[in-house]
Image (tube, coloured by chain):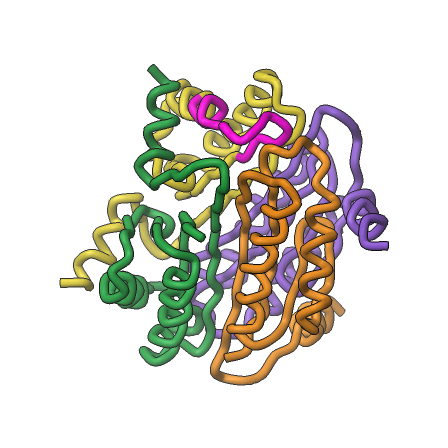
Chain colours: A yellow, B purple, C orange, D green
Amino acid sequence: MNVIVDLCVVPMGVGVSVGRYVAECQKVLQEAGLEHQLHAYGTNIEGDWDDVFAAIKRCHERVHALGAPRITTSIKVGTRTDREQSMQDKIDSVIEKEI
Amino acid sequence: MNVIVDLCVVPMGVGVSVGRYVAECQKVLQEAGLEHQLHAYGTNIEGDWDDVFAAIKRCHERVHALGAPRITTSIKVGTRTDREQSMQDKIDSVIEKEI
Amino acid sequence: MNVIVDLCVVPMGVGVSVGRYVAECQKVLQEAGLEHQLHAYGTNIEGDWDDVFAAIKRCHERVHALGAPRITTSIKVGTRTDREQSMQDKIDSVIEKEI
Amino acid sequence: MNVIVDLCVVPMGVGVSVGRYVAECQKVLQEAGLEHQLHAYGTNIEGDWDDVFAAIKRCHERVHALGAPRITTSIKVGTRTDREQSMQDKIDSVIEKEI
């Protein structure tokens, strides 16, 4: 089952600056070979359900290993059976309606 | 790794009334033996990371099988390494500060 | 416009224990006279759009005033024009399908 | 109070294709003069709290007016008192740690 996911990992108990924890998650996604795109409030990811969620679990493991005692993460996950749709398709479907 | 999760499954393309799809997810959680608590905008779940996310995947499979061609789901997932905390502990930690 | 909202306020830069900040938000909702129900990963709120969002803004102001330098909040907001629906109605519509 | 917001509006009861409703929200943000950036699972917005939330309310009004009887929207909202931070600053703070 293919998914498009939006991931936002928030480490707690490590102060206000969390960029290096988010960067660690980007590395995890990179290592997993998952297509992903960082934005200002999370990261879009595309791939097989199991691969994507295995990577998200590794994000938690690695962010804890970096010293964060608590993590609260928001995930949006979209699946559809009517047709295939990529992250770019979703963006294009909005942009073409704006014209 | 123990998790506390908040799950909100939104089937799309099936009209405005989605109660029976949410009820199906409750059944999935029940069958998985996971502690869970329905609220007005989602369901709190507690358990092992792998068990909880396996159940969430089954929710998507079963909601698609019931006829929903598209699903968008919101998940919050909390983990901590400093101490154990149950769903009820989280609620209690707020209520005791309100007194 | 009536809304049902799920609110989860996460103060950052104040350590791992955030119960007293969440308790402050409960007080804000109480003072605003808004119907609300705490759960393990947020708070359900019901009311007029403007009243609810004014209260959410006050939550941010008060949590900053308590010393949190950074806040990341998740909000789900539901509106419908086809019929009125309370928080309890949403729960009931699922439970009756489980029977 | 300046905010960075992530907005994801999901119209229900209008079938699986929701691009034109999301495009309407882009128009609302454009008309409001708010800086915003569409991604594959939502839109990042930056601005004053009141301006941003007034625009989000207009999104609900306009999406209902287009025919959607029900809407469920996810919002993330970030505020900080320690320093100013733009959407691009947030992205940069991650990218510089990846190098």
Percent position (x, y) of residue C28?
68, 62
Q: Residue at x 75, y 51 (%)?
A: B36
Q: Nearer the viewer, residue B68 or C39?
A: C39
Q: Quadrant of the C terminus of chain B?
A: bottom right
Q: Residue at x 47, y 37 (%)?
A: A49
Percent position (x, y) of residue A42?
42, 39
Q: Quadrant of residue A6?
A: top left
Q: Quadrant of the N terminus of chain B?
A: top right
Residue A77 versus residue C78 in the image, above or below: above
Residue B29 versus residue D81 in the image, above or below: below
- A14 in the magenta segment: yes
Residue D20 visible at all: no
Residue B74 visible at all: yes
Q: For the view shown, which residue lies furthest in the left direction?
A: A99
Q: Quadrant of residue C11?
A: top right
Q: Is residue A79 left or right of residue D31?
A: right
Percent position (x, y) of residue C93?
67, 73
Q: Residue at x 28, y 57 (%)?
A: D34
Q: Is residue C32 left or right of residue C12?
A: right
What span is in magenta?
A: A10-23
Q: Residue at x 75, y 55 (%)?
A: B37
Q: Nearer the viewer, residue C89 or D54?
A: D54
Q: Nearer the viewer, residue C63 or A52?
A: C63
